[in-house]
Amino acid sequence: GSNVGRVNKQRVFQVIDENLNRTFAWGEWDCCIFAMSCLCPDRLDVLVDQYDTEEGAIAKIEELGGLDQAVSDFGGTEVDINYVQNGDLIKLQGQPTLGIANAGNILCVTAKGMKSYRMSIAEKAWRFNDE
């Protein structure tokens, strides 16, 4: 396959390293913006400065057709939760939170900073490459 849409795993970890202590802010640095910074940075303008509350973030996702539709439009392909790889996009169970698979855990940006969650609470996964 071509390299179109292929995720640069190096970039994923660079984003994580550079933003480890960045302060959470809706519409500036939240779970969706973290995920997009890693996976499709050229589309960040769709989210950045488009909302400044949790309600606004949820409304924005609705406007994009819901989470699954938005992820698909941005180039994500759903993968079986049992075959997750580093750099895959993960949706957590029971909360509208996205994270990135990293070393067997899910790394998320939260109001309390970057947190790692157990993979057992993953609800869905998407891969942003063409392999």
Image (cartoon, rainbow, N blue to C red):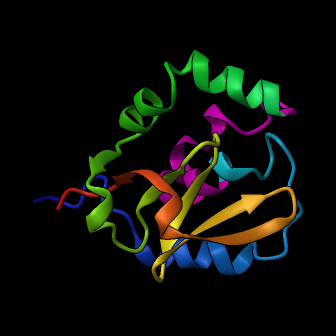
Residue shown at 62% from the left, 32% from the top? 46
Question: What residue sits 10% from the left and 59% below the top?
Answer: 1
**Residue nearest the observer in this picture, 107 or 120:** 120
Residue range corresponding to the magenta coloring = 34-53
Image position, residue 54 (x, y; %): 81, 33
The x, y position of residue 33, in whole percent, is 66, 49
Q: Residue at x 41, y 27 (%)?
A: 69
Foreground: 8 or 35? 35
Looking at the figure, which quarter contains the C terminus? bottom left
Q: Is residue 102 magenta?
A: no
Instruction: Residue 66: give x, y in percent of width and height.
Output: 51, 24
Residue 40 vs residue 86, the one in the foreground: 86
Q: Would you say 73 lies left or right of 56 here?
A: left
Q: Residue, x 78% and y 53% (percent of image)?
A: 29
In the figure, 12 relative to 72: above or below?
A: below
Prevailing secondary structure class for the magenta stretch in the rendered image: helix
Residue farthest along the left direction in this orientation: 1
User: Whole-percent x and y of residue 79?
Assistant: 27, 53
In the image, 3: left or right of 38?
A: left
Q: Is residue 57 left or right of residue 81?
A: right
Q: Is residue 48 left or right of residue 129?
A: right
